[in-house]
Amino acid sequence: MHYGICNLSIVPLRIEPHDKSEMVSQLLFGEHFKVLEIRKKWSKIRIAYDSYEGWVDNKQYEIISETFYNDINNSERVYSAELIDFVTDDKQHFFTLPIGASLPFYSHKKLKINNTNYLYEGAVFKDKQPKEALIDIAYKFLNTPYLWGGKTPFGIDCSGFTQMVYKLCGYNLLRDAAQQATQGDVLSFIEESEPGDLAFFDNHEGVITHVGIIMKDNYIIHAHGKVRIDRIDHSGIFNINTHRHTHKLRVIKKII
């Protein structure tokens, strides 16, 4: 078994091993993973954080040892808290960071990947936040354009949005909406929900394809065209601009 870590700001994770393949997720700086298969130009990986699998370009990650991989797993999780910032390495090379980038072995503004030391002077998230902080962090992504497979303020999809918001508050969600719907406890009615709970929506075949974060007073924040705020009722999401329902409510889950 081989192991790797993302040493670039944002790297696409693809469903097949070629550049024209669909992007299903992204690796952010500092995210580590198992390498399941290595080909000439591509590697199939499984991300440590959410066990999501896909293909990455061999030129866009760095090999790490099993010991280093396990040490990251056992260390405190620290994430960049600035919408966009940067780190510099020992040679004063500059690397941009989106919010939610991982900072391995962070201490006193320093972090490390293999033998390379980095300096990061921005704000960080490193402790579990109270549930009410979920909405505050969700607002940081407001108006982010929708991007299938995206996880950053430059482009994000519905489940990437909910996963990142929960991640920055110190809680783990799986990657896709249907996967996230398997987590937490079912609520019977919207009236039972609290800000920060998740609402899931299905398509005509009954497959869960969308997720958003419930706010107070029957509002929801979700990624649809962009990260936006709409109304939610027992039927689903009611778009405040078009004045019509856009998503059919399937289930509400309390994660924390």
Image: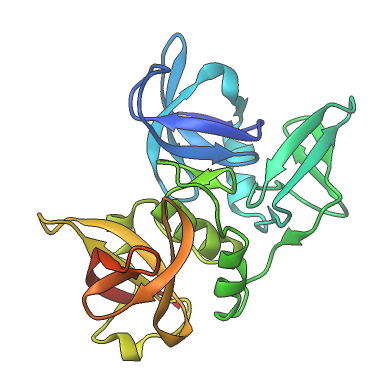
- Residue 120, percent from left and from top: 83, 46
Residue 240's quadrant in the figure? Answer: bottom left
> Residue 117, located in which quarter of the rendered image?
top right
In this picture, is 38 found above or below 231?
A: above
Residue at 45% over, 42% down:
147
The residue lying furthest to the bottom in this view is 191
- Location of residue 61 in the rendering, given as x and y in whole percent from the top left corner: 59, 26
Residue 255 vs residue 38, the one in the foreground:
255
Quadrant of the rendering where the C terminus is positioned: bottom left
Instruction: Looking at this view, name the residue that lies furthest to the front.
Output: 242
How many numbered marks does the figure carry? 0
Q: Position of residue 158 (x, y in %)?
A: 40, 54
- Residue in the foreground of this view, choosing between 18 and 209: 209
Q: Residue at x 74, y 49 (%)?
A: 105
- The x, y position of residue 205, in whole percent, is 10, 54
Q: Residue at x 66, y 55 (%)?
A: 75
The residue at 45%/32% (across/down) is 13
Judge left or right: residue 82 versus residue 238: right
What's the coloring here? rainbow
Q: Nearer the viewer, residue 101 or 233?
A: 233
